[in-house]
Amino acid sequence: MPEAFRVALSVHMMWGGLLLFFVLAAIFRRVSVFVWLFRLAALLMVGSGLALLAMLHFPAVFVLKGLLGLGLIGAAEAVLGQLRRGERPPAVAWALVAVLFVVVPLLGYRPL
């Protein structure tokens, strides 16, 4: 396994940080550092995911995982934005974020 692949995979497997920063940003709505850490973790996920996709020659299941991951980031940002404005996000938005936080990592645990 090439060194670049292992580095990108190691960065990409830290998805727990994304979940942690999302939960902290949702709980502590007025503390913007958690939102920025969530965004930084999301950028690291997107960047390492694109690198892995290129190294693996874009298999369809991982392209789907990437698209669902972008949807997850968008849905999480929408929920956090509504919370910061003092609005109550709909239950469907919370359910979408919860389901995607389970489905997206599970798609990555396929044998290569």
Image (tube, rainbow, N blue to C red):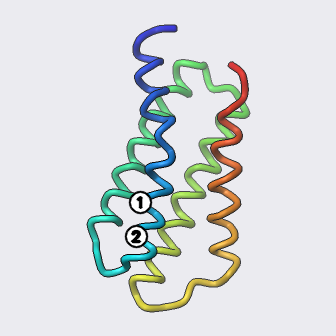
In this rendering, the count of numbered labels is: 2
Tell whether 82 sits left or right of 104: left
Label 2–label 1 contact, CB within 8 A: yes
**Residue under the point 42% across and 33% down:** 11
Whole-percent x, y for residue 80 in the image? 46, 74
Q: For mark 2, does the 10 Å Cα neighbourhood hold few (<14), some (14 to 19), or many (20 or more) residues? A: many
Residue 58 occupies quadrant: top right
Mark 1 secondary-structure assignment: helix
Image height check: is 5 above or below 97? above
Q: Could you tell me how far apart the alpha carbons at marks 2 and 1 are, in whole angstroms?
A: 6 Å
Q: Between residues 24 and 48, which one lies in front from this camera angle?
A: 24
Point out the image quarter for the C terminus.
top right
Instruction: Depth check: give the residue in front, 94 or 60.
Output: 94
**In the figure, is residue 13 to the left or right of 40?**
right
What residue is shown at x 66% (from left), y 56% (from top)?
100
Residue at (31, 61) in percent of width and height = 36
Q: Is residue 79 above or below residue 98?
A: below
Residue 26 position (above or below residue 2): below
Q: Where, by quadrant of the figure, is residue 27 drawn?
A: bottom left
Q: Which mark is residue 88?
A: none
In the image, residue 60 lies at what x, y percent? 72, 31
Residue at (41, 22) in percent of width and height: 7
Counting from the top left corner in percent of width and height, residue 55 is at 53, 18
Measured as percent of width and height from the top left, residue 94 is found at: 63, 73
- Determine whether 106 is above or below 88 in the image: above
Residue holding disc 2? 25
| Label 1 crowd (10 A; few <14 / some 14-19 / many >=20) | many
Q: What element carries label 2?
A: helix
User: For the residue marked with disc 1, what is the amino acid?
Assistant: Phe
Which mark, by number, is residue 21? Answer: 1
Tell me the kind of residue under disc 2.
Ala
